[in-house]
Image (cartoon, rainbow, N blue to C red):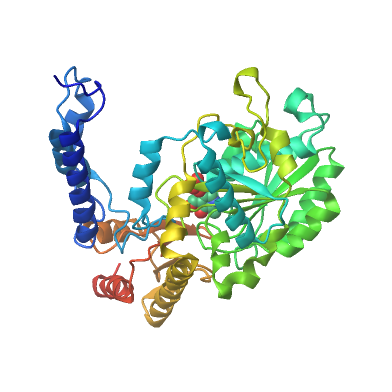
């Protein structure tokens, strides 16, 4: 008699699932360059998928892998394709899928340490490594999040708890005056979203103008803070960006940190795109000011090539992080252990997956020097692309290239959407649309360790040959 529990696989099914998975991963890796970057969607099939009722009886392991291979994969975007250049999204490291499988198998709940002792230590180890990259002191701590947006949301929550009197009890409703947050006109919309979600309200987000290199203007910031104080409002936080999404500009972190110190403002740095360029010697001076932030968002699912999701919030003073998020409850109490961390006290989540494993595993397997090489390679390719664009009379670079985002366009063309659509349809490359000082642009962001010079040359050659 088969004594396999109802939702478990028997030995033969486990072997089949393993074989099918290995084949799928291997085919995926080998097929990346030839796969369409953007799938030719089978809308009928997707509609049928949508309408399929919940099955009463299962189809079994092989039929499931057939469905994944025949229906899911052909209708998925090849984000790891070397000429997927549209967003700040890297491909996962080679070890990523395997680490994810292990994390799913052991299913540690990274809420309090008793449910995840080794995971608690691994997460702390990853956070310490990342804190060291940023230049944070030993008293810093953090938490891995679902991404940069959630890291910034949590960072602003910590700032509110620290700067708004009695925030935990009275919230925003009990504040004597509205609180105001400042960020640049080029900041990621996750800052606005965080302010809206936290109840600050978009009316209390100031978008500070930028200079000719798309960096927050500190003189304008100072003037806005002064005007708000004059009007009886309460400035409490500045969100600077190290690596804006559109152009990769880095706000002047040191002068902003000086102003924040003088004005008693919390400084959060949105380093989701750019902060991990600190790994590269050539960008260290540019980004050194990250170390002065009260809190910072990073994205291991971008420059550390972790499979989604892996964001990170670091807070310079661990006690402030915990004062925002630690709550006691009789049913979630375990004896404190100095080796362990209860991550439910570092963020809004209770049940949490073991995100740290995929980040830690990749650093263990490849070593940080391999990441420096990969990231350095993307910087060099972005410069190569910029040089090629500058050398073409029909093309025009529309912003300085600080990191790996390259904004450019055809001279005299007011709308690049048709060019972008054509590049994607013919399989040349997926680029993103951008608006640079109100002008339509194309944006290529090199975030892929598989992208080569030949890929960049192919893109430019095709653009020049086909024209706008
Ligand atoms: C500057 C910046 N901040 C925040 C984000 C949002 O990060 P996530 O998608 O991980 O939430 C991005 C995404 O590209 C970004 O470029």
Residue lying farthest to the bottom in this orientation? 391
Residue at the (43%, 57%) spot, across then down: 362
State left or right for residue 351 relative to residue 67: right
Q: Quadrant of residue 60?
A: top left
Front residue of 394 and 5? 5
The quarter in which the C terminus is drawn is bottom left
Picture coordinates of residue 72, whole percent (x, y): 21, 40
Answer with left or right where residue 309 lies relative to residue 274. left
Residue 433 appears at what percent x and percent y?
A: 40, 56
Which residue is farthest front? 1
Q: Observer-nearest residue: 61 or 463? A: 61
User: Considering only vertical position in the picture, is 168 above or below 241?
Assistant: above
Residue 181: percent from the left, percent from the top?
Answer: 71, 43
Q: Quadrant of residue 228?
A: top right
Q: Residue at x 76, y 58 (%)?
A: 257
Give the x, y percent position of residue 373. Answer: 45, 72
Q: Quadrant of the N terminus?
A: top left
Residue 71 visible? The answer is no
Classify 371 as above or below 281.
Answer: above
């Amino acid at each position: 008699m088969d004594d396999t529990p109802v939702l478990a696989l028997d030995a033969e099914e486990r072997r089949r699932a393993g074989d099918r998975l290995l084949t799928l991963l291997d085919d995926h890796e080998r097929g990346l360059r030839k796969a369409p970057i953007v799938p030719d969607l089978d809308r009928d099939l997707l509609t049928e998928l949508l309408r399929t009722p919940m099955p009463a009886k299962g189809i079994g392991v092989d039929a499931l892998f057939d469905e994944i291979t025949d229906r899911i994969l052909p209708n998925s975007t090849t984000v790891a394709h070397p000429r997927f250049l549209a967003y700040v999204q890297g491909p996962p490291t080679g070890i990523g899928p395997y680490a994810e499988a292990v994390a799913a198998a052991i299913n540690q709940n990274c809420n309090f340490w008793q449910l995840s002792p080794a995971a608690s230590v691994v997460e702390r180890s990853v956070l310490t490594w990342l804190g060291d990259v940023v230049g944070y002191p030993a008293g810093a701590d953090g938490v891995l999040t679902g991404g940069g947006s959630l890291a910034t949301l949590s960072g602003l929550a910590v700032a509110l708890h620290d700067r708004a009197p009695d925030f935990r009890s009275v919230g925003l409703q009990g504040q004597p005056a509205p609180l105001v947050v400042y960020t640049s006109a080029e900041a990621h919309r996750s800052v606005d979203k965080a302010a809206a979600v936290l109840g600050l309200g978009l009316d209390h987000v100031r978008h500070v103008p930028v200079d000719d290199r798309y960096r927050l203007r500190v003189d304008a910031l100072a003037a806005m803070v002064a005007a708000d104080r004059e009007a009886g409002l309460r400035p409490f936080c500045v969100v600077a960006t190290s690596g804006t999404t559109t152009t990769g500009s880095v706000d002047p972190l040191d002068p902003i940190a000086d102003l924040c110190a003088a004005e008693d403002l919390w400084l959060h740095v949105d380093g989701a795109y750019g902060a991990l360029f600190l790994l590269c010697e050539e960008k260290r001076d540019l980004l050194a000011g990250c170390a002065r932030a009260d809190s910072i968002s990073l994205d291991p699912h971008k420059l550390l090539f972790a499979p989604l999701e892996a964001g990170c919030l670091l807070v310079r003073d661990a006690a402030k992080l915990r004062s925002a998020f630690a709550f006691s409850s009789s049913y979630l109490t375990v004896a404190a252990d100095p080796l362990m961390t209860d991550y439910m006290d570092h963020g809004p989540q209770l049940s949490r997956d073991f995100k740290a494993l995929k980040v830690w595993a990749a650093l263990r397997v490849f070593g940080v020097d391999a990441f420096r090489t990969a990231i350095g390679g993307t910087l060099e390719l972005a410069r190569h692309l910029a040089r090629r664009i500058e050398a073409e009379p029909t093309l025009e670079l529309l912003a300085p290239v600080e990191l790996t985002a390259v904004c450019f366009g055809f001279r005299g063309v007011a709308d690049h959407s048709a060019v972008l659509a054509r590049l994607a349809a013919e399989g040349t490359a997926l680029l993103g649309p951008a608006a640079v000082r109100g002008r339509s642009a194309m944006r290529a962001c090199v975030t892929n360790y598989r992208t080569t010079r030949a890929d960049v040359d192919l893109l430019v050659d095709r653009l020049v040959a086909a024209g706008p």
